[in-house]
Image (tube, rainbow, N blue to C red):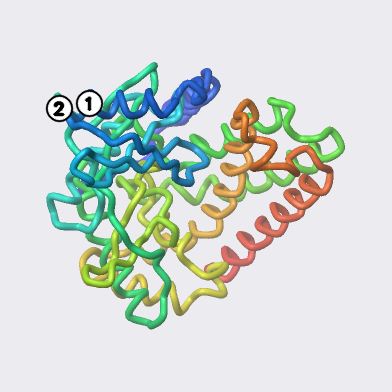
Amino acid sequence: MTMAKKTTSDKKLATSNQRLATSNRSCGNFTALTPDVIVSAVEKATGRNLAGFTHPLNSYINRVYELQTADRERIIAKFYRPGRWSKKAIQDEHGFVAECEAEEIPVVAPSKLKDGKTVGEVNGIFFAVYPKRHGRIWEQTSEDDWKRLGRVIARAHIVGSRKEAKHRMQLHPEETTAVDIAQLIDGGHIPQRYRESFATVADQLMELILPLFDDFEYIRVHGDCHSKNILHRPDEGLLLIDFDDMLMGPPVQDMWMLLPGHVLDSGTELDLMIKGYGEFREFDDKSKVLIEPLRAMRMLYFLDWISRQKEDPCFSTNFPNWNNDSFWSEQVRELNQQFQNVKEYIAQRT
């Protein structure tokens, strides 16, 4: 089994600095991505003629469009936000998904373009083309639904454990969350009256969770495995989609976001998922201690992510309350509550 663990503080700091530098680059100009540009780029890359049809799909980070070929096949074109991922990082994602597909794991792999690769580029923006797959968002209706979900995730993790994603982040608080906190505080995004209380709870969380992460395996994981990224196809079963946030992380990362609540309130669902997972791959029961820390990290990551969208023309529409006192008061309150959740679970495990 390929395992990548954190080794030295220097390595963590170097990678954190690299991520911060990449994130602070220009986000590019999606406004130049007109229907004519989209159609022309995909036609040139695929060698297929398209109808004059570009239907935008919901995506906060990237720009995603449904297109139609001249022979009426519907395809999906995803244009990656400039400056977010390098070409090699996108290729890491595509490689993982292609390996899963080769093992008959239900995923949607990018199509090969005319040059035999899966990453195209137009006006400095990377893009990929996918076949369209129908399905409805996964909803659990029975205990077996949770076990089925565990089986699919385990099969993907078997593939994910075979090698590293060399150009993707590792989900360790010193590599990711420390950068998120610095971006929020040093970037001046938090109103002055809440800056100290935010910094205090963030420091408390980091001190509490940092020692927890060094003793677990790190493999390629989906990274953003929640119910909206799992489709149910009535005749085929579950389908994992959107590996855009794929990274190196503890396997439990692909399980906790599916739970209906905090870990102490979701024991039945988690146990069922682990039971299904265990049919294909051993699950480290000790890694349950990472669930609430990962939730705290996700909360901070989301705030950081919002802060990096401020130049987006849709920012004020998508996040109208960002600069309001009530918004930041609530964020500090929720972070303090999550800090208590982490402490409570750790206390019950020891």
Which amino acid is tagged 1?
A: Ala
Q: Residue 39, located in which quarter of the rendered image?
A: top left
Q: Label 2's element? A: loop
**Of the numbered discs in the image, which one, if any, rests on residue 236?**
none
Task: Give coordinates of residue 168: x percent, y percent.
Answer: 36, 34
Numbered mark located on residue 114 in the image: 2
Q: Residue at x 13, y 28 (%)?
A: 116
Q: Is residue 324 left or right of residue 105?
A: right
Residue, x 52% and y 24% (percent of image)? Answer: 31
Residue closest to the eye, 24 or 136: 136
Q: Position of residue 23 (x, y in %)?
A: 51, 25
Label 1 and label 2: CA atoms lie apart by 6 Å
- Taking 47 as reference, is 311 left or right? right
Between 343 and 260, the one lying in front of the other is 260
Which element type, helix, strand or loop, lies under badge 1? helix
| Residue in the foreground of this view, choosing between 111 and 288 | 111
Assess whether mark 2 and mark 1 are in contact (beta carbons under 8 angstroms). Answer: yes
**Is residue 285 visible from the viewing direction of this image?**
yes
Above or below — where is 23 with respect to 244?
Answer: above
Q: Does residue 325 sit above or below 40 in this rendering?
A: below
Residue located 28% across and 55% down the image = 133
Q: Position of residue 56 (x, y in %)?
A: 44, 41
For this view, does 162 lie left or right of residue 334?
Answer: left
Which residue in the structure is indicated by mark 1? 45
Q: Position of residue 151 (x, y in %)?
A: 26, 68
Tell me how many marks there are. Answer: 2
Left of 102 or right of it: where is 228?
Answer: right
Q: Is residue 216 above or below residue 203?
A: below
| Residue type for callout 2 | Lys
Residue at 42% across / 54% down in the picture? 253
Outermost bottom residue: 142
